[in-house]
Amino acid sequence: MNILLIGATGMVGSRLLSEALERNHHVIAAARSPQSIQPHGRVTAVALDITDPQAAITIAQGADVIISAVSPRNTGDALNDAAASTNTLIELHKATGKRVVTVGGAASLHLPDGTPVVTYIPDEILPEAQAMRRAYGTLVAADIDFTVVAPGGMIAPGARTGKFRVAQRQILTGADGGMSHISAEDFAIAVLDEVETPQHFRTIINVGY
């Protein structure tokens, strides 16, 4: 499979790139500064500004599927950042017909009792959380072929175990009632699983332990 991976140099994006290569896919690895991407026979590193839809459409012509690992900056511009990147993903789908799988945030999910998770997001990360929640709503309204994959309350580098749970629209919780967490390595497995064997359409899923 030929994958366009946008945001290939970030904490999550770099794990997605490694997982895709582990599964023998070919990857167009796009980033603002792709110089840090290690040379590989199945990787084409390209510079891309996610806010430039036409450039993204040109790059995506050879791809079978589009993965976005771009997150808005946690600043007052977060809503504008998310709107611009989401618009590009929508334009990409409309121009190419390719499925879009994008990394989302836990703030777009609900607790088991139906309460929006965003209600409990701390102020210091609220701009990014609200932006990603709005981005999900924009994708739903656009009526395109997409899946949003969101980690639990915490994602960080860690072990690749291949063991995790998946829930739709609802955040996973542990035995203590707290929000789930996941390593970036296992999160990458979940994203590539959804890319290879699509099971969730026009919705958001949560991946966690």
Image: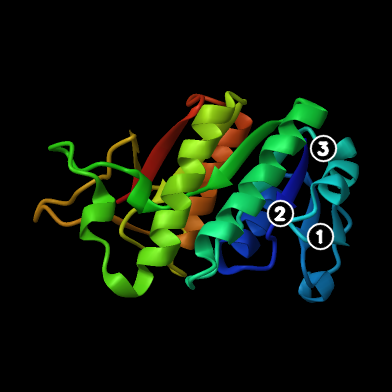
Q: Amino acid at mark 2?
A: Ile
Circle 1 residue: 48
Residues marked 1 and 3 touching at CB (< 8 Å): no
Q: Residue at x 48, y 71 (%)?
A: 76
Q: Earlier in the sequence, mark 2 or mark 3?
A: 2
The x, y position of residue 47, in whole percent, is: 85, 64
Mark 1 and mark 2 in contact? Answer it, CB < 8 Å.
yes
Q: Is residue 170 left or right of residue 127?
A: left
Instruction: Tell me the quarter of the picture where residue 126 sits.
Output: bottom left
Whether residue 106 sits left or right of residue 83 in the image: it is left
- 61 relative to 1 in the view: left or right: right
Residue bearing the label numbered 3: 63
154 w.r.t. 142: above or below: below
| Disc ID at residue 6 | 2
Disc with the residue nearer the chain's start (1 vs 2)? 2
Residue density around tag 3, few if under 14, some if 14–19, many if 20 or more, within 10 Å: some
Q: Are marks 2 and 3 in contact (CB under 8 Å)?
A: no
Quadrant location of residue 39?
bottom right
Q: CA distance from mark 2 to mark 3?
A: 12 Å
**What's under tag 1, amino acid-wise?**
Leu
Q: Residue at x 66, y 44 (%)?
A: 87
Does residue 23 appear anywhere in the picture?
no
User: What amino acid type is highlighted by mark number 3?
Assistant: Ala
The first of marks 1 and 3 along the sequence is 1
Few, some or many residues within 10 Å of mark 2 (<14, 14–19, 20+): many
What is the C-alpha distance between the residues marked 1 and 2?
A: 8 Å
